Image (cartoon, rainbow, N blue to C red):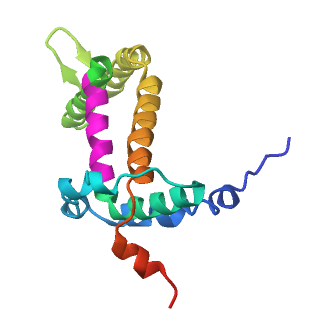
Amino acid sequence: MARINIPIDALTSRLNLSSRFDSVRSTSLSTRFANLKPVSEFFDIKRVSKPQNFGEVQSRVNYNLGYFSSNYFAIFVMLSIYSLLTNLWLLFDIIFVGGGMWGINKLQGADLDLGFTRATSQQLYTGLFVIAVPVFIWASPITTVLWLVGASAVSILGHASFLDKPIESAFSEEAV
């Protein structure tokens, strides 16, 4: 049976996604949060207006995504924390798996001797897997991720499309 090859590059090249996320990959977290714009500039009510057409929406979103990228990243992080705090089963499962793997790795391949029984690392990983997978399914992570994507898209794209570019940027775009 022949494999189906989907040209991902052809699909994403029109959206310019690869170059849009290059700066995200190359910067550290401290640099990303050092570029936060002031709250007064981020919530400038005087610059909020309804765009006239889709071209203006596109122009505003392109400008604001680049200019306020650190602020939008902070919003995404806050929404992620909120989604984990409201889905305690998922938070418990993440901590349980992380702590379990850390504890098993602390044994450095040695068996866990509890006095009345011995457990190998493979048995400990299997036990961790047997407990963590049903809890993970019960925690409905797909719903949480879909909520996070939707809430981030609405808040970030809503802000980016309704906040007008500053007047200085309009003059810099004009051809001389």
> Measuring 42% from the left and 74% from the top, which residue is drawn there?
170
Q: Position of residue 106 (x, y in %)?
A: 19, 36
> Measuring 39% from the left and 59% from the top, which residue is drawn there?
164
Q: Position of residue 52 (x, y in %)?
A: 54, 55
| Along the line of sight, the residue nearer the viewer: 77 or 164 | 164
Q: Which residues are magenta?
A: 71-85
Residue 7, compared with residue 135, is above or below; it is below
Residue 12, quarter of the rendered image:
bottom right
Q: Residue furthest top?
A: 116
Q: Main secondary structure of the magenta part?
A: helix
Residue 171, quarter of the rendered image:
bottom left
Q: Position of residue 152 (x, y in %)?
A: 40, 40
Residue 44, quarter of the rendered image:
bottom left
Task: Answer with left or right where residue 1 lies relative to residue 33.
Answer: right
Question: Residue 81 in magenta?
Answer: yes
| Along the line of sight, the residue nearer the viewer: 128 or 69 | 69
Task: Answer with left or right where residue 5 lies relative to residue 34.
Answer: right
> Measuring 44% from the left and 42% from the top, which residue is drawn there?
153
Q: Residue furthest bottom?
A: 176
Q: Residue furthest left?
A: 115
| Along the line of sight, the residue nearer the viewer: 40 or 99 | 40
Question: Residue 89 in magenta?
Answer: no
Q: Quadrant of the N terminus?
A: top right
> Measuring 32% from the left and 59% from the top, which residue is drawn there?
68
Q: Position of residue 176 (x, y in %)?
A: 50, 91
